Amino acid sequence: MAVEAATLSQGLRASFRTGRTRPAEWRAAQLKSLVRMIEEKEDDISNALNADLAKPRMESYLHEISLAKGACIFALKGLKNWMKPDKVPAAITTFPSTATIVPEPLGVVLIISAWNYPFLLSIEPVIGAIAAGNAVVLKPSEIAPATSSLFAKLLPEYVDGSCIKVVEGGINETTSLLEQKWDKIFYTGNGYVGRIVMAAAAKHLTPVALELGGKCPVIVDSNVDLHVAVKRIAVGKWGCNNGQACIAPDYIITTKAFVTELVDSLKRVLVRFYGEDPLQSEDLSRIVNANHFNRVTKLIEDKKVADKIVLGGQIDEKQLKIAPTVLVDVPLDTQLMIGEIFGPLLPIVTVEKIEESIDYINAGTKPLAAYLFTKNKKLQEDFIANVSAGGMLVNDVALHLTNPHLPFGGVGDSGIGSYHGKFSFDCFSHKKAVLVRGFGGEANARYPPYTVEKQKI
Ligand code: NAD
């Protein structure tokens, strides 16, 4: 495989060097084909997502297919403008001159994707890489095999195979790919592998974008429209791949005085969404595979955790399903409260005063997303000013990712770099500084000999 990976990267580099990927026409043609692919193969994509995750059709459409198509159309609309050199003021030191920032493609880029949104998380960075004029290798996640093989089948049918390739496989194949020299590596997944990717990239001085995860907090103040808040939290947690989403709420913080009301509301909403027996609901994704099922169920097998379940807790090993589960005041030294949950368990931490929640969040690693529900403007301002997170959202969850004018990415342990909309184009471009002078404007003081007269200036 190492030899194949080397041949692949050399072949793509040769194609890139022909200049084929640079014209706006090539980029637009690929993006138009991708829109066509998404339209024509919507059923196949939906079926693959269902095979990989039992993802409900509506969820696949709302959270993957429509967003992917939207990202493609947004790039198509923006492309010509994004590609234009950006004229900046000329400095007096270079008079007369013109100064521009010229975006240029980085070259040949590697995109390594994750299993939880296996279509969107693969195609969205590919869109950015193509828009920026790069040659691309996509390595989808082997944990979502139906979507991975769909990419391997579909992309060669729709896009220029001399410059855009799919490599399927797991750790071995990815390791071989990582041994090659790339001009950027874009990785989505967990921080442990993120470190492996960054170490491999360092050997070639390759820049990386790392889209990682973390524990995304949700502060719920008592000054809210509770029913609306709880519906939004519930759909952002269990309606997003049953909690297997990087920006799904990981835990709630609320006050001791408000927690009972909050749990009662969660109970009502969960019954409304998923019925009395959520394990039978077709609107809940399953856990992706037995390994992850065992990882998540182990978190609640710990007696210190199990004792704190107030809602849910049912599991079905055969179907790999876990019911929406809410827990209150789980000891903070348990794995549930330390690591990213990435599943349908939602612990609630209680504090005396809601203001304490900001310090609680800041005591941990920086999350990918942080959420607050309150009508209190002062609390909103304190939250925005004092909590560090990749992104944040007040009075809703997860939806910030649907706005292509906002960068999407982490900070600290939740990642490096961002994408979406024009940020994707920037992520895969080099901003080249270009200064053009004429032959006038000679300043003699610049040239030796540095005589006493010259030094008087
Ligand atoms: P995963 O298991 O699909 O792994 C991601 C990729 O890494 C895969 O393509 C896999 O083949 C590759 N990989 C795995 N082990 C490797 C190794 N040892 N060496 C080289 N490559 C290797 O996905 P995952 O990591 O389980 O994904 C879940 C994590 O990703 C969570 O932490 C989640 O928060 C995060 N995530 C982040 C985002 C985001 O946009 N920031 C999106 C989705 C998931």
Image (cartoon, rainbow, N blue to C red):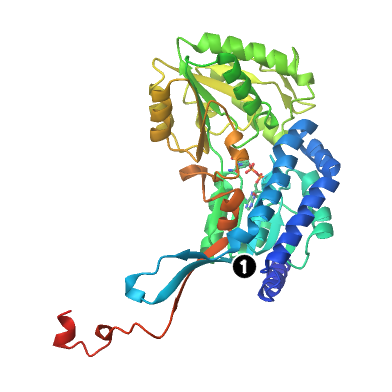
Q: In the picture provided, is 360 more to the left or to the right than 373?
A: left
| Dot 1 alpha-carbon crowd within 10 angstroms: few under 14, some 14 to 19, many 20 or more | many
Q: In the picture provided, is 333 more to the left or to the right than 65?
A: left
Q: Quadrant of residue 261?
A: top right
Amino acid under label 1? Answer: Gly
Q: Is residue 20 above or below residue 369?
A: below
Q: Quadrant of residue 185?
A: bottom right
The quarter of the image holding the C terminus is: bottom left
- Where residue 429 sits in the image (x, y, percent)? 57, 62
Res 376 seen here: yes
What residue sits 65% from the left and 33% below the top?
Answer: 244
Q: Is residue 415 above or below residue 451?
A: above
The quarter of the image holding the N terminus is: bottom right
**Foreground: 64 or 324?**
64
- Where residue 218 sits in the image (x, y, percent)? 52, 26
Q: Is residue 442 above or below residue 178?
A: below
Q: Quadrant of ligand 1?
A: top right
Q: Secondary structure at mark 1?
A: loop
Q: In the picture provided, is 367 more to the left or to the right than 188?
A: left
What residue sits 60% from the left and 23% below the top?
Answer: 233
Residue reaching furthest to the bottom: 449
- Label 1 sits on residue: 107
**Foreground: 21 or 32?**
32
Whether the residue carrying mark 1 lies under 8 Å from ligand 1 is answered with no
Q: Is residue 346 above or below residue 408?
A: above
Q: In the picture provided, is 418 more to the left or to the right than 356?
A: right
- Where residue 57 sits in the image (x, y, percent)? 80, 33
Res 173 seen here: no
Total marks in image: 1
